[in-house]
Structure formats: structure tokens, C-alpha cells
Image (spheres, coloured by chain):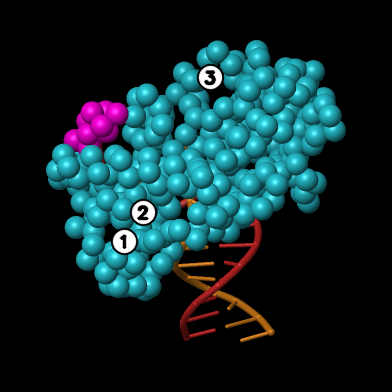
Chain colours: A cyan, B red, C orange
Amino acid sequence: MPELPEVETLRRALARELGGRTLTALKIYEPRLLQNASERKLQKELIGRRLCAVKRRAKFLLFDFGKHAVILHLRMTGWLTLHPVENPRFVFEFSGKKTLSFHDTRRLATLHLVPSTQAHKLPPLAELGIEPFQPSYTVENFVALLQTEQEIKRLLLDQRKIAGMGNIYACEALFASTIHPQRPAMSLSHAEARRLFVQIENILKQAIAAQGTSVKTYRVLTGESGSFQNFLRVYDRAGEPCVRCRTPIVRITQGGRGTYFCPRCQR
DNA sequence: AGTATAACCTGTCTGC
DNA sequence: TGCAGACAGGTTATAC
């Protein structure tokens, strides 16, 4: 479900609503969620601890409880809310009567417990690549990643290379840059690479400002929809006329994922 | 090494 | 109406 803008939107709301509060209870209802720690271990290490920060790395949310941190990935259908939900996968209770519930229809989400100071060098964060809005995201580093025959769209989805983008924003960034998604990455000129580099941050920034894209299940913490779905120009628009040239948008499959693009604008 | 496919899950939509 | 099949915002194990 969520890509970088959706996770960042949630992070900001979580930091505002729960930052500084103490965890008073914790219950796991979906054991499959847990990757490296039992419910008992989580309760032992976290209950009574203060949530000192809510951070984000790519599409991962990191709840920093000081000594330990919980790392959550929402995958396709995970969503967090301060309202009660049916069949929650976990519930965290905080001081001040704040209850955080997690729902996940497809049960694909993951949760890790890690020592806070080691988080960035342990799974699941260890292998992540450069990330938009971070100091490592420079045009030089970006261009260096393109020295491969791999299709550019597929490269954009490879979290070990560029972390945080998903299917929607990869399609939108390529459209904004007028680059064909099947181009070998190394075939991009320096000007094209620079254009894509800039448009990735541009699109993500706009999407964060719009509180993310609600296509199906994603909602902000309050339960409301994001609004960037109103600004998508190619994603999920197969057959509709391109906003620039009126040519019908085409859908193809790359690596098992749908890719949407304008066959005339994107070369 | 890099890449393609299947697998993990469940809900929804489309076409016959 | 029923049902099979495709598809969904993501990652990862396995098979070439």
C-alpha cells in the first residue's frame, strides 16, 4: 500500500500524537507479523518505556523507545489508526489514553525489534539504498546507480539501490521526466538522469504535501484519505488520454508489476 | 551475478 | 447469479 509519502505522512502524525508518551500495554494478535521477537519479548523490553521519536527509513516506520526500537513495514494493506478497528493485528496502548491499532487485511506486514543504536545496520534496514531527501541522495550517487542494463522502472523499485519509491511514484516520476520505463538505465543521457533525479524528489514532495495517495486502503492516521490520487497523471489510467498529448495511456507489465506510461511523451 | 517466477495473503473487480 | 482469473500501493525465497 504505502510508499515513502504515505509512510512519511503517518510518521508525522504519529510523532505529533504519540511522541513523548509511555507505552503502557502491548498485544499482538497476528504472530506472523513478528520477524525476530516474541510478543513476550516485546512486552518485556517496551512496556514502561517512553516513545522518544518516530522515525522513517524508506518505507519503514521506526518507533524509538530509547534502548530498543520497533520497525514496522506496512507492505500492501497495513494501516495505523488511533480509533478502534475490527481484527487488529496489534494494539499499543500509550499514556494519556491513546490507543494505536494496526490493521492489515493481507497480513503481509512485518515487525522487527532491534537495539536502537544498531537499527540502521541490522535487518530490515541494512541493505537499503540511497533515499530521496537524505544527504546521500546526490545526482552523482544517482547516476552511479544507472550503470546497468536493467530497465529504469525496475531499478527505481529496487530498494537496495533507491529506497522509498514504489509503483505509483516510479510511474509518475518517469512520466514527469518523459522517460520510457523500459529504457535500459545506462542508456539515459546525463540530462535525462538529472531530470529523473529532480522529478523523483519533486513528485514525492508534492505527494507528501497532499498527505499521500489513497487508491484503496491507505488512510492517514485520522482515517481520512490522502489527496494525491487526484493529481496522478499516468498511474491506473490505462486507455485514458495523456494529459500532455491525448495519446491513450498504456499499461505493460514489468517484473510482475503494472507500469503505466504515455508511449508518445515517454521516449 | 543478475533476472524471472512463485510465494506470501485477502479482497475486489471483470468477463464469460 | 456464479465462478474463474486477473489484479492490487511490497518484499523475498527459489529457480534458472
Secondary structure beneath disc 2? Answer: helix
Q: Name the residue nearer the viewer: C6 or A171.
A: A171
Task: Specify the label residue A171 is tagged with.
Answer: 2
x, y (%) of residue A132? 39, 34
x, y (%) of residue A147? 19, 35
**From the viewer's perspective, is C11 left or right of A238?**
right
Q: Provide the chain ID for the residue under circle 2.
A: A
Q: Residues within 10 Å of mark 1 (few under 14, many from 20)?
A: many
How many discs appear? 3
- Identify residue for label 3: A119
Residue A263 occupies quadrant: bottom left
Q: Could you tell me which residue is drawn at 23 percent across and 39 percent down?
A: A194
Q: Are marks 3 and 2 in contact (CB under 8 Å)?
A: no
Rounded to the nearest whole Å, what is the CA distance between mark 1 and mark 2? 7 Å
Query: Closer to the observer: label 3 or label 1?
Result: 1
Q: Provide the chain ID for the residue under circle 1.
A: A
From the viewer's perspective, is residue A38 above or below residue A224? above
- Identify residue for label 1: A261
- Sequence-wise, the earlier of marks 3 and 2 is 3
Highlighted range, magenta = A138-147
Q: Provide the chain ID for the residue under circle 3.
A: A
Secondary structure beneath disc 1? Answer: strand
Rounded to the nearest whole Å, what is the CA distance between mark 3 and mark 1? 37 Å
Q: Could you tell me which residue is drawn at 34 percent across and 29 percent down?
A: A137
Q: Establish whether labels 1 and 2 are both on one chain.
A: yes
Residue A45 in view, yes or no: yes
Query: Closer to the observer: label 3 or label 2?
Result: 2
